[in-house]
Image (tube, helix red, strand yellow):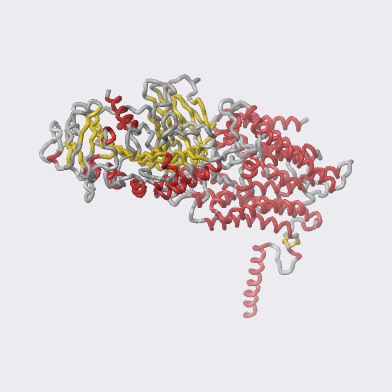
Amino acid sequence: MLSSLLAVSLCFLALSVRAGSDYHERLLLRPLPQNALLASFNFRSNETSSSFERQNFRYFPRSLGQILQHANTKELHLRFSLGRWDAESWGARPWGGAREGGTGVELWAWVDAESETDAFARWLTLTNALSGLFCASLNFIDSTKTIRPVMSFEPEGNHPNMSSPNLHLLHGTLPHEVVCTENLTPFLKLLPCKGKAGISSLLDGHKLFDASWQTMSIDVRPVCNTDGSNCVIEMEQTVDMVLDLDRSKRPRDNPIPRPLPIEEIECDTSKSYNSQDSCFPLVKTAEPSWSLSEIFGRPIKGACPITGEEGEDGETVCLNVPAERNVDIKTNGGYAEVRRDEGLLRCYKLPSGEDFDITLPEQSLPAPLLLSKPPLTAARSINGHGQERGSVQAVLNNPSDHPVSLIYLESLPWFMKPYLHTLRASIPGAPASTNPIKETYYRPAVDRHRGTHLELLLEIPAHSSLILTYDFEKAILRYTEYPPDANRGFDVAPAVIRLLPPDGNLNTPLVFLRTTSLLLPLPTPDFSMPYNVIILTSTVMALGFGNIVNLLVRGFVGADEIDGWKPGGLKGALRARFEKLKARWFGKGKKDE
Amino acid sequence: MAIDKQKAILFGAAAAVRLLLFTAFPSLPNLLTGRVEISTPVTSFKRLQEGLFLYTHNVSPYDGGVFHQAPLLLPLFSLLPNPSTQPFATNLLYTIVDLLGASALMQIAESGQSVSSRLFTSPRKALRWSNIAIGASFLFSPFTIATCIARPTSALANFFVLSSIAKATQGASITSILALAFASYLSFHPILLFPPLLLILYDAYAGSSKGPSNPLAFSLVHIGGLAAALGMLLYLSAILTGSWEFLAATYGVRLLLPDLTPNVGLWWYFFTEMFDSFREFFLGVFWLHILSYVGGLTIRLRQQPLFVVTSLLGIFAIFQPYPSIADSSLYLALVPLYRHVFPLMRYSFLASSTLLYASFLGPAFYYLWIYAGSGNANFFYAITLVWSLGLSVVVGDSLYAVLRDEWEVERPEMRGKEVRRI
């Protein structure tokens, strides 16, 4: 029952789009096991497509809107992520993977262009402009990091000319990009309240980038009525993070963790050594206490004045805790609380112009919140040792009761050369004749021009796991192509896994999964000695060449036929010199006598 | 009769050794295929497997950075059963190719071209090894055996080079030119062997009863023949793959060296460390350097064109972009034909110990760099320098010995005396 509740709460968030006003924001807070807290921010703004075309921007940020128009981009998805979603303890991802990115930066867009080369040129315009807008290295998404997925992504928006061949999907990743506070500031500037009011006033770089896992996303898509009229351009921004409560509660001026005073620790009194000064601490079973101002460093600074006020639109902060949990609200203004889903979701209407803080005291609960199970778990790793070759192993585990079809997308850098003839997919326990690979799309890499693009359509039976392996070879690069920290290795983008709806139902929300990125160590040359190498190699070549040319162009004569040359080579010359000296000395001696 | 029996025993033993190694150590072929000393990006059997996989799955193997080998290999190898499950057919193919190569080498030895060509007869011609010994030195050379077990496509190119030489010494123009065309088609640089091979063919015609035709017409006919054979092969490849993009992926890669995988040659580390603005310049210099030997050697050693071929093969084994020990094994197979000049060589001990030193330390240093991490790239680079130096000493020293041998025909009284070069 509870797991179905969670799904409801997300769909509730996702479907409240079209209702009412043009700007909408919502924060969902959900305590997770092991003192973690999920904070999921969501901001949506709409602009009618006619005013978008006329550059009449109201809630849609002008800077982004003009970039999209200039690059003829019809739909845009951008992700900045850090950390790993721990699906084993945290359950399914907050948006079913649809708004969460893999480590680093990920960008995909549908670009309107006549040909593939035009589309790529516009894509480069787009990445360069976004790079400037978000202070990220998006301009490094070049042809080697761009792929054109064929099965993994489908447009989320309603495009009137969807079937036309002019809409090109391009996808690029920067797994090495470290997302940080310089990316958050432009992100906040795109919001109408710019972090001054509303839930965005909680977003602070110090806390956000200190989280165990965080992801920021921007999605722009056209949304139309079913008959294709009344189109709006919808922009959705999300920030999701999992905070470690103990870590976030440390004060900023004194961030070093220190042990609690012994009076505050619950001791295991059954231990023989338990006394005044020695204690075996018991694991705390009570839910920890926290408040917004403790965790984010400040309370919410009142409602963003342009959000709609009626019904669900006004319910800006939602708390997903069991119904028995005590919640204190601290504010001087007027607020409203609405309970939904049998009390498991409490939503608050924010006061305007007054601080709003939520405080939860420490409390023991009869039953913890049940988290929805992830539909699939995936882990990917590099096997083998040495810097010459290796193999990639991906383990996809389907814990559910029904078979799962999925699309597995890999985008590998060109210097990692996979051998597709070694690709094996095996399901332990399944008969050997079953081939879980139903379809393969493969575009091999070209050195320095294009990365590898591999898409697989896989099917995993219920309660089983699939092991996917392939061998690859590591290329050695030119010494100028290595980054300054060459021995750290190169990052390989996360694999993107899309779960297909079980019965081909297209209206179910998209479910994605991303593995972690991989670190690929490459063999390195010695960076200190280009001159030495040039000199030494040239010497060996000159020795070979010189010797042969010498033999070819000169003739032989007998050693005794030339004046000034003694036979016998060096030995002969030395002997002659010695004879001369001997003659002189002994000659002298003779004279003296 | 006795010769035939010896030959049968030799071939039987060589085939037995290879097949025994293939079957007794099933992981050995894959181990050797992974060795950079044997498999280069343009000859590796694993890359051939990948190309074959893409070809049989209707993906163009040349639209990628892995497969750089000739297109006609694809239908040939797709006829064989999958080597990962049924390796016997492939193993047998490579064994037979080695035996045919040895047979061609023995034909070369039989022709006696190495000691007495049309224009020159060595005063030391009595001193030579038997055909069987020369064949055995090829078939039982550890380099040849390792090449055969690792199954690079350069083994096929070696066979075509050897048979082209053998047919040229017999005066069989068409077969010789066809074999040369195949060798050049597979590994590009054997086309540089054309001038000395043309001289061997011309000498063979001139020595025969038919009498020599006009030299110009003779060479034009043969150039035309080679061009036609190569054109046909390339055209067949284009039909097979459906486009001409294989040219850039095969010969373009050999010319421009985009793949810097380590090998025993001098190019890879040089171009790893090269400054970007000078890369094209030095590529041109390196290729010109190889080209420059062809004319010089052919003109200076007009009387012994077979030795020009031998020396050129040695130079290719050192200075080509992607050399491997397969190329060295081909050169070292031809050197014993010149047994009669061995007494004139001055640095045979130095050269052989350098080669031994490099062959033992090379794998060790590669291990230190790539796997143990206790050495860096310079370790392996230094060994490739030593290896190249050792081979170039062999090439230079044998050239010295042959020239000295030639000179002693003019000056028989200088035999055994010291000489100077002026």
Q: Position of residue A355 (x, y in %)?
A: 20, 44
Asked whether, in this view, residue A298 is left or right of residue A73, the answer is: left
**Which residue is located at x 73 percent, y 41 percent?**
B129
The answer to which of B321 and B380 lies nearer the viewer is: B321
The answer to which of A229 and B65 lies nearer the viewer is: A229
Q: Position of residue B231 (x, y in %)?
A: 73, 39
Q: Quadrant of residue B31?
A: top right
Q: Position of residue B32 (x, y in %)?
A: 56, 37
Q: Position of residue B253 (x, y in %)?
A: 61, 44
| Image quarter hosting the N terminus of chain B | top right
Q: On screen, B119 above or below A324? A: below
Q: Is residue A471 visible?
A: no
The answer to which of A468 and A77 lies nearer the viewer is: A77
The answer to which of B203 and A558 lies nearer the viewer is: B203
Q: Residue furthest bottom?
A: A592
**Which residue is located at x 20 percent, y 39 percent?**
A358
